[in-house]
Image: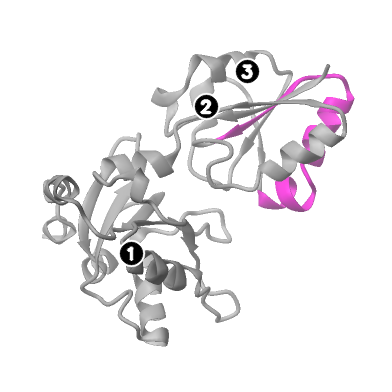
Amino acid sequence: MTRLYLVGLGLSPRFLTDAAREAVKDSQCIFIDVYTSYFEPAALEVEAKPLDRRELEDKGGAAIEECLRAGKNAALLVPGDPLAATAHAALIASFRRKGYDVVVVPGVSAVCAAMSAACLSIYKLGGVATVTYPRMGVYSARPYELVEQNLARGLHTLLLLDVKDDGGFMPPSDAARVLMELEGKFGRGVFVGKRQVAVAYRLGWPGGGTAVGSLEDIARSRLPAPAVLIVPGSLNPVERECLSTLPSVGKLLT
């Protein structure tokens, strides 16, 4: 049976699994998701056709289906884990309904990696939201509302960052400014400038790391993308002590 592999690439080439490499070798058509996060296809030493959000979601992976119809195996390479925080589940359902075998190859997800890097328990992770640029001048209130709910329950919140129209990734400084803009709009104390937030940036890549600082300091920082922000909820003693050992964004500014 013709097969589609959804292959998790992990954080960077160093995190590629044997299963991922075997799936790529078994595929005659190789595609890569270029909107979820950063990854260098050259690291795989194979040619991969880039597919953006429009091709994967609006067109339903038509290029992939063309390959499968020709009787060839296909691999869709996805940075991180293929199902951690993306809409690729819709592709799985669609291709399975059409009679194709679909195999998911897990990869190291930035969600789990960022929580570990920030010394925060994943058992206390609440819902995940995305900080987005305003669309037609309108900000999405979802990050504000979710963080407010999670803080009330003592839960941590992981915030993914938007992808720009040109394909670039929102830097932490822009995300911090968006969150403070939301505070100015709603004014309930969720994203005040002094709010302490963990930043995990370029995890698995050279120059990557994790730091902690206020939204004000993050807004003035030059920390690189791709990145995620984590708003800590109630901290147990171990989390508090471990979090305190991370670099301060304020010191990185000096």
Does residue 133 lie above or below 9 as drawn? Answer: below
- Res 23 label: 3
Q: Residues within 10 Å of mark 3 (few under 14, many from 20)?
A: many
Q: Is residue 2 visible?
A: yes
Taking 73 as reference, is 192 left or right?
left
How far from the left and from the top, in percent, is residue 101? 78, 24
Alpha carbon distance from label 1 to label 3: 37 Å
* Quadrant where the image shows the N terminus: top right
Secondary structure category for the residue under label 2? helix
- Count the marks: how many? 3
Taking 158 as reference, is 254 left or right?
left
Q: Are marks 1 and 2 in contact (CB under 8 Å)?
A: no
Give whichever of discs 3 and 2 has the lower sequence position: 3
Q: Nearer the viewer, residue 140 or 172?
A: 140
Quarter of the image where one finds residue 96: top right
- Res 42 label: 2
Residue type at mark 1 is Ser
Residue type at mark 2 is Ala
Which residue occupies 50% across, 75% down? Answer: 141
Q: Residues within 10 Å of mark 1 (few under 14, many from 20)?
A: some
- Res 173 label: 1
Which residue occupies 59% across, 13% down? Answer: 22
Which residue occupies 52% across, 26% down? Answer: 42
Secondary structure category for the residue under label 3? helix
Q: Nearer the viewer, residue 237 or 174?
A: 237
Q: Nearer the viewer, residue 148 or 72?
A: 148
Q: Residues within 10 Å of mark 2 (few under 14, many from 20)?
A: few
Which residues are the magenta region? 53-78
Secondary structure category for the residue under label 1? helix
Give whichever of discs 1 and 3 has the lower sequence position: 3
